[in-house]
Each structure stands twice: as C-alpha cells, then as structure tokens.
Amino acid sequence: MILRIQNGHIIDPANGIDRIADLWVRDGVIAAIGESDCGPADQTIDAGGCIVCPGLIDMHVHLREPGQEWKEDIASGSRAAVAGGVTSMCCMPNTGPHIDHAGIALQIIARAKQVGLCNVYPIGAVTKNLDGKELTEMRELSRAGCVAFSDDGMPIWHAGVMRKSLEYAASFGFMIIQHAEEKMLTGNGAINEGWVSTQLGVAGMPAVGEDSMIARDIMLAELSGARYHVAHISTKGAVELVRQARGKGLKVTTEAAPHHFALTEEAVLGYNADAKMSPPLRTEEDRLAVIEGLRDGTIDVIATDHAPHHEDDKRCGLSCAAFGIVGLETMLPLSLQLVRDQVLEMPRLLATMTCNPARLLGLKAGTLSIGAEADICIFDPEKKWTLDRKKLFSKGKNTPWHGMEMTGQVTHTIKAGQPVFSHGAIVGEAAYE
Ligand SMILES: NC(=O)N[C@@H](CC(=O)O)C(=O)O
Ligand SMILES: [Zn+2]
Ligand SMILES: [Zn+2]
C-alpha cells in the first residue's frame, strides 16, 4: 500500500526538514520525501496549504482505564488523541488499580493495541498505591513497557523516599516525573492563591507550594545524578529553578501545558470549575515566565495533562470540583498561538510535541526519517473553528474553551501509514453532522 501526501509543507524538526514537497509512505513506513520511485500511489491526500509533521506526542495524559471508565477509557482517549493529531501518548498511573505493577501496564498496552489508533506508553508509579511510602518494582514496570516513573496526581512528598527513588532510577537511567506540590502549603486550596482567590473567597494554592518542592528535588537530583522531570510547570519561580539547574548541567527537564501559557487565574472568576486544575492557572507574570521558558529552551516539551472528569465531579462548586481539564483536542491550536505571537518558529514549536518528548522518553516516534513508522499529523494552521464541548471525542467535556474560536485544525492523522482521522471523523466512523 502506497500513500502519497501531496504538496504539503513538510516540517520534521528531528531532521531539519522544512519545505514544500510530497511525502511517500509505503507499507506503513516513511518511504521518501520529494521525488520517489515508489510507483503509483494507492491513495493520495492533498495537503496543499497544510503542514505535514510527525504525529504529535503527548507525554502527560490521564486515560482513566482501568477504574474510572465513565470519565474516559483507552478507546475514547485514543479517539480524542488522533482528533488532536496525537499518535503517541503516555498515560499516568493514577488509575484504579494504579499502574504500580507490571500486569496493569501490560493490560493497558494490550488494550491500546487492540484499539489501534494511538501508541500508549504507560508511566509507572514510583510508590505503591501512589501513597509515597514504598517504592514499586520499577525495573519490572520498565520491562513491561513503562517509559518513565511518576506518582502524578500526587507528589512524591517524602524527601527520603524521593531521594531513594532518584538513586534507584539513576542506576537504570529511568526518569522520575514529579507533580511538584507541597501539600503542607497548598492544603485544601482549589485555585491559585492571590487576588482572585481573595475576591472569590476560595482557598488558594500558593506558588511557593510548587517552587519549594522543585528546589528540594533539584538538590536531590544533583546528589543522585538522576534524570528529574517537572510535570506541568506553572510558576515563574519554578521556571527559574529549572533554568538554574540546567545551567549547572543537571539532568533536569520540564513540560508546560497549553492552559498554563494560554490562560491566567482570571479564567476561574465566576466560579468556573472548568478552569480548575492542579497546578492551578496562575498570574500573568507566571504565564509570561512559562512562555519565556519555552522561548529560551528551559521548557522543552508541551504536554496537555489531559484530565477528563465527569460533569458530576465538576458541577459541585469551585471548592469541591475535581482538578483537571481535557487537553488532547486543543493542544495544537492553543500551541500555534506561540508561533503567531512570534515566541517560537514553527519547527521549534513542533519539536516540543514531537522529537523532544521522544528523546526524553526514548520513544521510536516523533520523526519523519526514512524507514520510520509513518505516524503523521496534517494540519491547516490558519483554519478557524469553534470549539463545541459536545463534539469532543473525549468523554470528558471539562474544557474552559467551550464556544471559543480556535485557529489551526488537524485535517488528517495517520498511524503506521493508515489514515485514522480525516476531516473531523475517525476513519470508519460517521462524522458529526
Ligand atoms: N492535573 C489535574 O488537575 N488533575 C490530574 C492529576 C494531576 O495531573 O496531578 C487528574 O488525574 O485529574
Ligand atoms: Zn499532576
Ligand atoms: Zn497529570
């Protein structure tokens, strides 16, 4: 089977490719860019006016299976992923049961293969039950397919346990991903601590709750020589700490979620629980610091922290609503704003969602190299559309962008050479309207 993607603007940051050409796929792998001797195509996609790039990678997703399938499951999460141009994603271990033993990781990988839309790479738990006390069998989890380790949803709060986990991880080259939140400081806070929390009379989570844990962890990362990755970075102080650590040559990396560079705490005014997540939306100063971190390379990954929840968990008042928003289907348009604002050029932006996470996690993905599995995203960077939460493929409808105009739309997603998403529909399923 030969697929020809015609006349697109091909951008492959991994190989420094940035030109208008045809892309040829033969038997599921990238066969040629430009001229080819593939012979006549069985299928042609016209990508004129569109960008053709590697299928996106989202290294921070909550898929809720096993355990909370009413919020999301591997099938619905995979559909949301490909609708957003994502062909590989990492799922966090705060499922029920947690991904704290090999059997669960194997089960998730098997189910994702059966669904067959998007590669799913589990992140194994650092501690059993995510309770921060006893380390998991990281080596077994790694053998079962876990690509990094985290207690996300919870911080690895105990300094001694964090030290031990970093030392253990260092000896195998594993990466520890921290949800940095000092609970003794954030307490029962629901949103950022600041004028909005005062205005609303809702308990706040101070920025220092994030910063202080990262400061502690960086010291422990230096001591152990381990690879330490800060999840969903959100404060000016945290970006500065990571910048300094990297300046010292430590193996410290971080990711930013689109909501933290697109919105501020003011989005929760009106008690809007669809803008409630952890860490919370912060101030304009923090937002600009996250953007500067992306610009100067302190932050090398954009990841969504896709956190689907049921309406019942969100419509119960701002203080008691669950933390989290969906992200897979809005990652690309929201991130493209950074190009429109001239923070990043298109190839560097696409690197944050392709080759950069692939490099951190050792994934064979995020590239259009000849011979690589043909995971491809085709998008129209200028196309305007209005987000309607009812039309999201995710079961989670918890988004702060309902009714808002987005610029930039995925037209096709190709997985291992097969179109899986095309013009608004999963291939083989009826389109909306
Ligand atoms: N980010 C969130 O607000 N929620 C996440 C947990 C997490 O990422 O810490 C969830 O699992 O719902
Ligand atoms: Zn988290
Ligand atoms: Zn998360």
Image (cartoon, rainbow, N blue to C red):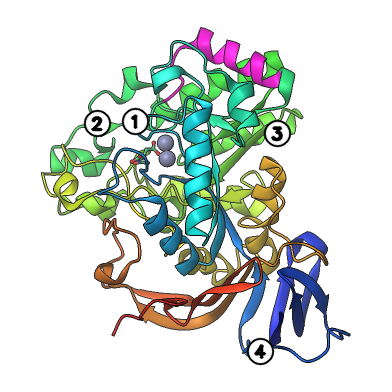
Q: Nearer the viewer, residue 242 or 393?
A: 393
Q: Quadrant of residue 16?
A: bottom right
Q: Which residue is mark 4?
A: 44
Residue 321 in the image: x percent, y percent?
18, 42
Question: Is residue 91 visible from the viewing direction of this image?
Answer: no
Instruction: Check if mark 1's residue and mark 2's residue have beta carbons within 8 Å.
Output: yes
Question: Farthest left residue?
Answer: 316
Q: Nearer the viewer, mark 1 or mark 2?
A: 2
Mark 1, residue position: 206
At 69% across and 18% down in the image, what residue appears? 222
Q: Which residues are magenta?
A: 155-170
Q: Say which element carries label 4.
A: strand
Q: Give the Cα separation between the discs numbered 1 and 3.
A: 24 Å
Tell me if residue 160 is in the magenta stretch: yes
Going from N to C along the chain, the mark reached first, 3 or 4, is 4
Q: Is residue 113 above or below residue 415?
A: above
Residue that label 2 marks = 189
Q: Residues within 10 Å of mark 1 (few under 14, many from 20)?
A: many
What is the CA distance from the residue labelled 1 to the residue labelled 2?
A: 8 Å
Return the residue at label 3.
246
Mark 4 → mark 1, Cα distance in angstroms: 53 Å
